Amino acid sequence: MSGLRTIAASLPFAAVLTIALGAPLAFAFAGLAPRPGEPMVVLAAPWADAARLALGAGGGLIAPGRLPAAALVWSENPSFADRLYDEGAWLVLDTDLSGILCQRSEERA
């Protein structure tokens, strides 16, 4: 019974710790969520082609990624991000990270 009391006593601390650490992370990732109708970055499995995922989800390719598993994509469809996930995307982000993950075709030599 002593063990249950110890666990019960530590639950409020665990809840506060989870909120204290989780809230800033949630706000940070919320800013990276894609906006409907805006360009977005799609990341797929290393063996997948992100451009093909975008086409399969009904969108278009703006710029290929440095690796085939990343691409800068766009669609007018407000559910495009959800459709990318349905096609197998691992992560769909706002374009804030696009400079790191993708390069425009005119930058290629």
Image (cartoon, rainbow, N blue to C red):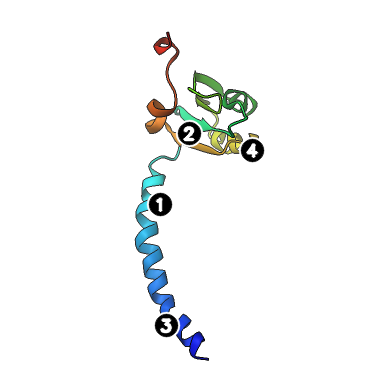
Question: At label 3, which amino acid type do we have?
Answer: Ala
The dot on residue 26 is 1
Q: Give whichever of discs 3 and 2 has the lower sequence position.
A: 3
**C-alpha span from label 2 to label 1:** 20 Å
Residue 46 versus residue 18: which sits nearer the camera?
Answer: 46
Which tag is nearer the camera, tag 3 or tag 4?
Answer: 3
* Location of mark 2 (residue): 36
**C-alpha span from label 1 to label 3:** 27 Å
Task: Tell me if mark 2 has few (under 14), some (14-19) or many (20+) residues whose alpha carbon lies within 10 angstroms of its own.
Answer: some
Q: Give whichever of discs 2 and 1 has the lower sequence position.
A: 1
Q: Residue at x 62, y 24 (%)?
A: 52
The dot on residue 9 is 3
Question: At label 1, which amino acid type do we have?
Answer: Ala
Question: Element type at marker 3?
Answer: helix
Question: At label 2, which amino acid type do we have?
Answer: Pro
**C-alpha span from label 2 to label 4:** 16 Å
* Location of mark 4 (residue): 86
Residue 24 location, x and y as percent?
34, 54
**C-alpha span from label 3 to label 2:** 45 Å
Residue 103 location, x and y as percent?
42, 20
In the rendered view, does 22 fall on the left or right side of 75? left
Residue 109 location, x and y as percent?
42, 8
